[in-house]
Image (cartoon, rainbow, N blue to C red):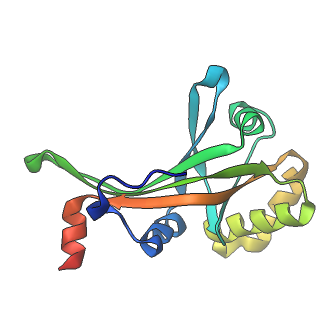
Amino acid sequence: MFRKMRRKAQELSREETLAILTANTAGVLGVSGDEDYPYTVPVSYVYHDGRLFFHCASEGHKIDGIQRNDKVSFCVIDRDEVIQATFTTHFRSAIVFGRARILTDEHERRTAVELLVKKYSPDYVEEGRLALEKSWNRTTVVEIRIEHMSGKAAIELIRASAS
């Protein structure tokens, strides 16, 4: 169902791909936009147990796209170093394909938001909970259940890690 990577020598392992998703703080969400144009938007997220979570406003282009078509993609760039002398880029990235859903169950929403607070403000977990209570009714939480993922790196980085 999902394409195989054309440049297999540059493919990262599942563990390396998960490390990219876990370590980074921002990614680009792709949804089905208006008039079938792809709509991409950067979001802060957390990876947990085969799923990505993020929160957002209750209305807008992103939510409309998810409600129209729950199939989404999500890309995280881990490294992007331009090497001028060799006209190349040393990159590492991960891409995820999955199904997005707006969480409505209170327990699921709270669990996801607590994961976000622990990732982004680990020294302020209690303060984060209090801040959430103030905006709880205006917060939409989205889960992406991952169906396929892949990671890729510049061949130079692959060779360097093998030696």
Q: Nearer the viewer, residue 88 or 133?
A: 88
- For residue 59, side relative to residue 61 (left or right): right
Question: Which quadrant does the C terminus fall into?
Answer: bottom left
Residue 45 image point, x, y percent: 62, 57
Question: Percent position (x, y) of residue 70?
Answer: 72, 43
Task: Name above or below for residue 117 compared with residue 83.
Answer: below
Spot occupied by residue 93 in the image (x, y as percentages of width and height) = 40, 57
Q: Find residue 33 and report its image quarter.
A: top right
Of residues 123 and 51, the one drawn nearer to the viewer in this rendering:
51
Looking at the image, which residue is at 54% across and 55% down? 96
Against 80, residue 157 (above or below) is below
Residue farthest to the front, as pictured: 1
Given residues 61 and 51, the one toward you in this image is: 51
Residue furthest bottom in the image: 163
Counting from the top left corner in percent of width and height, residue 133 is at 88, 59
Vertical side of 61 occupied by 14: above or below: below
Q: Tag count in the figure?
A: 0
Residue under the image location 91 percent in, 48 percent down: 137
Give the residue at the far top of this rendering: 35
Q: Is residue 124 left or right of residue 152?
A: right
Residue at figure coordinates x 26%, y 58% from the top left: 154
Say left or right for 123 vs 158. Answer: right
Q: Residue at x 65, y 73 (%)?
A: 122
